[in-house]
Amino acid sequence: MLRIHFTPEDLTRVRVAPGPDFLWEITNSVQTLQRTDGERVFGAWRRWVRPRLPESRRLLSPLLPPRGYSPDFLTPTSGDRTTLRAAVDTLLGTPRPRLRAELTRLAGTRRLPGWAAALAEGDPDALARLGKALHAYQAEALVPHWRHVRAAVEADRALRTRHLMDGGTEALLAGLGPDVQWRPPVLEVTYPVEQHLRLNGRGLVLQPSFFCWPTPTTLADGGLPPVLVHPIHHSADWADAAGAPERAAGPGPLGRLLGQTRADLLRATRAGCSTVEAARMLQVTHPAVSQHMNVLRAAGLTTTVRTAGRAFHVATAEGRALLAAEDRRAGHGSGANPRP
């Protein structure tokens, strides 16, 4: 059991991450790839991706066992994480003492390949090899599915935001799923080991994760900025898309109607987003977001509120109706994550 201890101040400092985290999705998916449970959710993706990952999988799997301890440095909580390159650069800048300590701890639970010793000493070649493996894995295993990953995480964020608006922080915490119980002032999470995380006024980031399975996870070092990574609901069309991402990657009906970028922007405004958040989620420039938002706003699909010099975009009733029609056509439902 993981027990997260809140103070009154912590309850005012809970926030939901704005979108998928590149390195958490990589690490969680490498672990999920090695598991055999969750066949209904991940079976088609596993069968599709395994033949495509010879080198990067061999490098990453020893560092990310499907159960038990994994090094925290692989999912940094500081630095620029708005792009995969920036996140990997932060990871590769991990101080040598921390590399050594975390890889030594991992070596105490499983046998590591010989190159891990060089990585633990901060060897530049070993670090460069790890960085290349992370980029290669993302390109081969996740990029073909990233639109689906991003949309699902954004939908989960919208759900969390609704819980927060309707019932406050305690409703947000209480609605995280069957593996999480809010017993004030402690959040109890189903976990493979006994761990206590005392927030002590630092607050908590809730990070929805597409590939987190089957229960939430967190960092082993309680001294790092607190984060709880939790599984999301997977829509009914994911299994089909996972087996043929090249075909599924084409624009859907909404994308053909509006253009793919504008369709993605409209989806992002379901829960509301700033120009900066939209640019980060879609990997486009701020002027491009503003230009496309002008079109959506003129069509009556979004509205924009400006406060403190920032623009915040929200889907109108007409925009939400268009998104709801898309969801019905795709067979999106709601409910808890399916269990094997």
Image: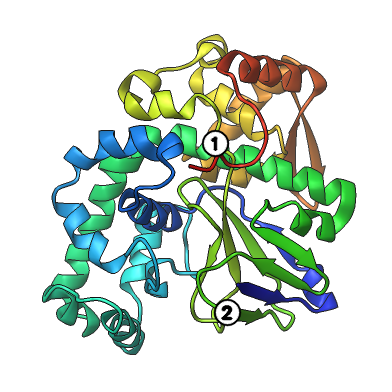
Of callouts 2 and 1, which one flags the residue occurring earlier in the amino acid sequence? 2
Depth order, front residue of 162/63 = 63
Q: Is residue 64 left or right of residue 299?
A: left
Q: Residue at x 60, y 64 (%)?
A: 190
- How many numbered circles does the render carry? 2
- Residue 51 horizontal/vertical position (percent): 17, 39
Amino acid type shown at disc 2: Gln
Residue type at numbered disc 1? His
Q: Is residue 80 above or below residue 244?
A: below
Question: Going 75% across and 68% down the picture, which residue do you hit?
Answer: 13
Mark 1 secondary-structure assignment: loop
Which quarter of the picture shows residue 75?
bottom left
Mark 1 surroundings within 10 Å by alpha-carbon count, few (fewer than 14), some (14 through 19), many (20 or more): many
Residue neighbourhood size for the residue with mark 2, other residues' Cα within 10 Å, grouped as few (<14), some (14–19), many (≥20):
some
Q: Residue 42 is drawn in which quadrant?
A: top left
Report the side of 251 relative to 185 (left or right).
Answer: left
Q: Residue at x 59, y 40 (%)?
A: 233
Q: Position of residue 294 (x, y in %)?
A: 67, 24
- In the current view of this chain or complex, which residue is farthest to the left? 114
Identify the residue at image location x=47%, y=29%: 238
For the question of whether residue 241 can be seen, the reply is yes
Q: Which residue is mark 1?
A: 234
Q: Which mark is residue 268?
A: none
In this view, 1 is above or below 205: below
Give the CA separation, mark 2 to mark 1: 28 Å
- Residue at the spot of label 2: 195
Q: Nearer the viewer, residue 59 or 306?
A: 59
The reply, left or right, for residue 328 in relation to residue 12 is left
Q: Position of residue 1 (x, y in %)?
A: 60, 72
